[in-house]
Image (cartoon, grey):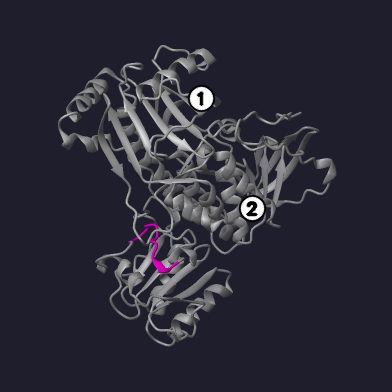
C-alpha cells in the first residue's frame, strides 16, 4: 500500500497543509474516464485546467498529500504568465511574486555582462517573475478544486499501466490499497523520475553533464535588487559558478557548483552548507550577516528528451517528457508550453472533433521545441559547468578577456527560455499569405500582446478557442465567412470571430469586437488593409494569416489546423 508522507513538510516561510487521501472505498463507482492525469505539479495542473476549460472532464492523481517540498521552480517567464492567465491564476502570481528583467554576470568582483530582457508598453507581464513553486501549486490546486470537471485525488500513485487498443487500465495505489481506473487517455506529468516512463521502458535522448549544483534557500536580509546574479570562478569555489536569486518572503536562492569529486550527500551536511554560504556572503560584502536555512538539494544538469511523447493512450508532458538544465529557467516554463499545446488537441480528439493525428502533431512540435532547447541549454551548461578540459580552457579565456574587452560580454548570455515558434508545423496553412506579410507574428509563432486600454490587452480576450482576428472598418463580417464559421461550430469546433475595428459601432457576425482606434494592433500585426485576418489556435499560436480572407481559404486553414489534411504517413 502506498503511504505518502503524512506530516507537514518543514519550512520557515511556507505553511504546508496535509490533505486527506482520496480512497476508492468511499467512491465505489469507477466509470471509464476521458482523461487521467498523473501528477499534480504545475504542468499537470495547468493541463487539467486547460482541459476543463475546453469542457473535458479529467481525474488528477497526486501521489503526495501536500504540495511539493522546497521552492524548486522559482522563475516564471512572461509567456508562462500569459498561459497562467488563461487558467486563472496569473493575478495571484503577480500579487505575490517579484518581477524582474535584468541578469548580471560577475567575475573577480567586476560586472562583465548585464542582460536586460525586452519590455514595452504592450506587455502586460514582466519578462520574469520570481515565486516559490509551493505557492504556484497552491493557486493551481485552488483553481482545480473549484472546477466541477476536475476530480482531484490526493495520495493516489500510478502503480501500473496496461494498454488496450484504444484505452488504458491504470492501476492506482492508495493508503488502503489498489484500485483500477479505465482512461481513454493517460497524461504522464509525474516528473523527471517518471515511474510511468520507467515502467514503459522508454529511453531519453541527449546529454547528461557531470557538474552538480547545490540549491540552498536561505532567509537573509540583503539590500540587493531582484535580478539574476551569476558569479564565475570565485576564490572560495575555483573554476565553478554560483547563482543567486531573490525570492518572496525574505528568501534567497543560492546555487553553487560542486567539485567533481565531492559526494552530493557530503555537500548537504549542515557544516558544508554553512561554510560555503558564509564564503559566498563574504565575497559579495555581507560577511557575518545572519541567515537561516530553509531547504537544500542537489541537482545534475541534464539535457534530455523522449523522441516521441505519444505512446498509444499514454501522452508525456513536462519533465516526464524531457529533462532540461535550469540555466535559462527552462524546466517549468517549457512544461507550461507542453501543457497548453497538449490540452486543446487532447480535448478535440477526446470529443471526436479531430482525428488522433492531431496528437501526433503535439509530439512533433514539442519534441522539436525540446531539441532546440537541448541545443541551447547545452551551450549554457557547457559555459556554466564546463564538462571537459577543452571547454574549461575556452570558458576561462572568455572570463579573462571579459575584464577588458566588452565584445566578449554576450558570450555570458544565458539564452533565456522563450516560447517556441512552430514554423514547420503541419497545422500551419499552406494556402494563406504568410510570406507576403512584412511584419507581425508568422506561422507557428506565439502571439504578440497589444495594449488596447489602460488595463486592457489583446491576450486578455483570446485563447481557448480558434480565434479569427478579422481586421475591419465595416459594419459586418462578410456572410461567406460567417457561414463557414457557423458550419465549423456545428461540428464542434470552438471558433470565434474577433473583429478588430477602429470605429465605435458594432460589427455584425462578430462574436467579439475589440477597439483598435489608435491602430496599435494593426501595426503590431503588420496589417495595412481592410479584411486582413489572423487565425490563432487555442494555444494562441498563429496557424494562418491573410492580407485578404475568403471562405474557401478559411476552411482550408481550419482543416489544416485540425490535422484533417495531414498526410497518412504522418499519422
Tally the numbered discs: 2
Q: CA distance from mark 1 to mark 2?
A: 35 Å
Residue at mark 2: 143
Q: Where the N terminus falls, by quadrant?
A: top right
Q: Tell me: 543 left or right of 52.
A: left
Give the camera-side residue of 513 and 454: 454
> In the rendered image, which residue does mark 1 sit on?
291
Q: Nearer the viewer, residue 100 or 469?
A: 100
Q: Residue at x 53, y 51 (%)?
A: 95
The relative height of residue 47 versus residue 238 in the rendered view (above or below) is below
| Depth order, front residue of 87/207 | 87
Picture coordinates of residue 108 (x, y %)? 26, 24
Q: Nearer the viewer, residue 17 or 501?
A: 17
Q: Which residues are magenta?
A: 442-454
Task: Say which mark, if any, is on residue 250.
Answer: none
Q: Position of residue 418 (x, y in %)?
A: 38, 47
Dividing the picture into quadrants, the one containing residue 408 is top left
> Taking the image as drawn, is residue 112 in sight?
yes
Marks 1,2: beta carbons within 8 A: no
| Neighbourhood count class around disc 1 (C-alpha, 10 Å): few under 14, some 14–19, many 20 upward | some
In this rendering, the label closer to the viewer, 1 or 2: 1
Residue 548: in magenta span: no
Report the predominant secondary structure element of the magenta stretch: loop
User: Which SS class for mark 1?
Assistant: loop
Q: Quadrant of residue 6?
A: top right
The verdict on residue 448 being magenta is yes
Which residue occupies 75% across, 34% down?
174
Earlier-in-chain disc, 1 versus 2: 2
Relative to 312, does residue 532 appear above or below in the rendering?
Answer: below
Horizontally, residue 84 falls left or right of residue 280, namely right
Amino acid at each position: 500500500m502506498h503511504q505518502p508522507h503524512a506530516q507537514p513538510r518543514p519550512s520557515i516561510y511556507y505553511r504546508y497543509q496535509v490533505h486527506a487521501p482520496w480512497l476508492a472505498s468511499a467512491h465505489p463507482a469507477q466509470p471509464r474516464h476521458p482523461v487521467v492525469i498523473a501528477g499534480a505539479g504545475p504542468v499537470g495542473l495547468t493541463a487539467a485546467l486547460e482541459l476543463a476549460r475546453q469542457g473535458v472532464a479529467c481525474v488528477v492523481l497526486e501521489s503526495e498529500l501536500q504540495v511539493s517540498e522546497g521552492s524548486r521552480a522559482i522563475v516564471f517567464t512572461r509567456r508562462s504568465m500569459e498561459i497562467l492567465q488563461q487558467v486563472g491564476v496569473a493575478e495571484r502570481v503577480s500579487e505575490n511574486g517579484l518581477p524582474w528583467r535584468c541578469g548580471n554576470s560577475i567575475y573577480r568582483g567586476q560586472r562583465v555582462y548585464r542582460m536586460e530582457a525586452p519590455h514595452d508598453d504592450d506587455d502586460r507581464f514582466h519578462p520574469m517573475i520570481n515565486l516559490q513553486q509551493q505557492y504556484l501549486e497552491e493557486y493551481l490546486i485552488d483553481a482545480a478544486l473549484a472546477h466541477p470537471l476536475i476530480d482531484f485525488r490526493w495520495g493516489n500513485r500510478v502503480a501500473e499501466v496496461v494498454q488496450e487498443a484504444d484505452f488504458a487500465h491504470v492501476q492506482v495505489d492508495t493508503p488502503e490499497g489498489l484500485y483500477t481506473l479505465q482512461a481513454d487517455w493517460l497524461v504522464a506529468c509525474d516528473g523527471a523520475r517518471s515511474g510511468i516512463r520507467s515502467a514503459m521502458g522508454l529511453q531519453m535522448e541527449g546529454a547528461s553533464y557531470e557538474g552538480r549544483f547545490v540549491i540552498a534557500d536561505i532567509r537573509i536580509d540583503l539590500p540587493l535588487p531582484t535580478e539574476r546574479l551569476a558569479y564565475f570562478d570565485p576564490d572560495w569555489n575555483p573554476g565553478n559558478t554560483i547563482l543567486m536569486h531573490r525570492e518572496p518572503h525574505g528568501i534567497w536562492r543560492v546555487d553553487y557548483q560542486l567539485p567533481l569529486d565531492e559526494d552530493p550527500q557530503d555537500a548537504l551536511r549542515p557544516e558544508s552548507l554553512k561554510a560555503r554560504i558564509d564564503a559566498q556572503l563574504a565575497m559579495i560584502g555581507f560577511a557575518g550577516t545572519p541567515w537561516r536555512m530553509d531547504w537544500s538539494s542537489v541537482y545534475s544538469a541534464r539535457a534530455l528528451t523522449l523522441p516521441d511523447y505519444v505512446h498509444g493512450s499514454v501522452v508525456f508532458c513536462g519533465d516526464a517528457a524531457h529533462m532540461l538544465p535550469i540555466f535559462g529557467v527552462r524546466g517549468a516554463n517549457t512544461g507550461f508550453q507542453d501543457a497548453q499545446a497538449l490540452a486543446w488537441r487532447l480535448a478535440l480528439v477526446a470529443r471526436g472533433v479531430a482525428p488522433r493525428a492531431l496528437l501526433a502533431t503535439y509530439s512533433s512540435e514539442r519534441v522539436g521545441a525540446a531539441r532546440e532547447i537541448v541545443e541551447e541549454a547545452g551551450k549554457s551548461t557547457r559555459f556554466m559547468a564546463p564538462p571537459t578540459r577543452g571547454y574549461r580552457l575556452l570558458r576561462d579565456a572568455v572570463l579573462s578577456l571579459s575584464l577588458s574587452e566588452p565584445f566578449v560580454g554576450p558570450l555570458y548570455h544565458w539564452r533565456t527560455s522563450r516560447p517556441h515558434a512552430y514554423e514547420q508545423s503541419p497545422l500551419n496553412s499552406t494556402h494563406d499569405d504568410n510570406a507576403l506579410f512584412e511584419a507581425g507574428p508568422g506561422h507557428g509563432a506565439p502571439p504578440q500582446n497589444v495594449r488596447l486600454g489602460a488595463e486592457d490587452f489583446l491576450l486578455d480576450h483570446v485563447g481557448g478557442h480558434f480565434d479569427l482576428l478579422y481586421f475591419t472598418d465595416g459594419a459586418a463580417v462578410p456572410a461567406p465567412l460567417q457561414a463557414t464559421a457557423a458550419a465549423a461550430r456545428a461540428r464542434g469546433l470552438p471558433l470565434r470571430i474577433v473583429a478588430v475595428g477602429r470605429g465605435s459601432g458594432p460589427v455584425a457576425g462578430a462574436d467579439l469586437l475589440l477597439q483598435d482606434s489608435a491602430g496599435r494592433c494593426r501595426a503590431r500585426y503588420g496589417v495595412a488593409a481592410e479584411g486582413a485576418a489572423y487565425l490563432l489556435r487555442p494555444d494562441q499560436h498563429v496557424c494562418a494569416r491573410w492580407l485578404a480572407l475568403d471562405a474557401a481559404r478559411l476552411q482550408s486553414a481550419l482543416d489544416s489546423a485540425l490535422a484533417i489534411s495531414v498526410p497518412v504517413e504522418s499519422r
